Image: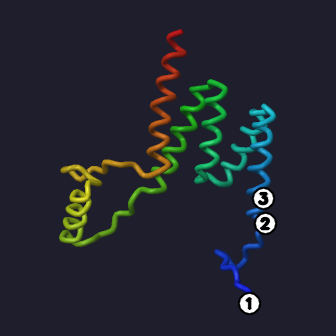
Amino acid sequence: MPQMKVAHRNKNNTGADDEADYDWKRSARLLEQDGDNEEAIDIYKAVLKKQPHNAYLYDRLMIIYRKEKAYKKELSVITAAIKKFSDLIQPVKKAHSKKITSLSKSILHAVGLTDKKGLVLYQPQPIARWEKRKRTANQRLAKTLQL
């Protein structure tokens, strides 16, 4: 039987990045399981500086802060994550003809993705998930401030 070749994303990819990625994830998760959340947070924040668009890092930080009932810190992470990813997915405005722009808006409205004014009705993931989490964190923070 002939052997199959594996397609790689990058010619220079040695796999070292994948191994390093696995190492910090494994280390941080083990620290979380051992209850050493501060060390795990430090790892996640250090990797976040190198990989600012890694949703996994934001998710783990949110989870740790929620477990610790540090709702203000959780909200700051959520806000930073939403801002980072919103900036990432902003559509690039290109100069199209008016007809193409009009047809595009009509199609988006027809399939229910925009309202009559052309405003987007749905947020892409993970932003939609984080917006929901932000509402929950605000509610929990309000409860703790009332007590």
Reading the chain from its start, which is encountered first: label 2 or label 1?
Answer: 1
> What residue sits 48% from the left and 18% below the top?
142
Q: Nearer the viewer, residue 69 or 93?
A: 69
- Residue type for callout 3: Ala
Which dot, 1 or 3, sits closer to the camera?
1
In the displayed structure, 109 sits above or below 77; it is below
Q: Nearer the viewer, residue 120 or 49?
A: 120
Mark 2 vs 1: CB contact within 8 A:
no
- The kind of secondary structure element at disc 2 is helix
Q: Which residue is mark 3?
A: 20
Q: Residues within 10 Å of mark 3 (few under 14, many from 20)?
A: few
Q: Looking at the image, how many numbered discs can be counted on the residues?
A: 3
- Where residue 84 sits in the image (x, y, percent)? 52, 49
Hey, which quadrant is residue 60 in on the image?
A: top right
Q: Which residue is mark 1?
A: 1
Quadrant where the N terminus is found in the figure: bottom right
- The kind of secondary structure element at disc 1 is loop
**Relative side of 71 to 138, left or right:** right
**Relative side of 5 to 109, left or right:** right
Mark 3 vs 2: CB contact within 8 A:
yes
In the displayed structure, 55 sits above or below 134; it is below
- Residue type for callout 2: Ala
- The kind of secondary structure element at disc 3 is helix
Q: Which residue is mark 2?
A: 16
- Residue type for callout 1: Met
In the displayed structure, 104 sits above or below 8; it is above
Hey, which quadrant is residue 14 in on the image?
A: bottom right
Give the spatial CA distance, label 2 vs label 1: 30 Å
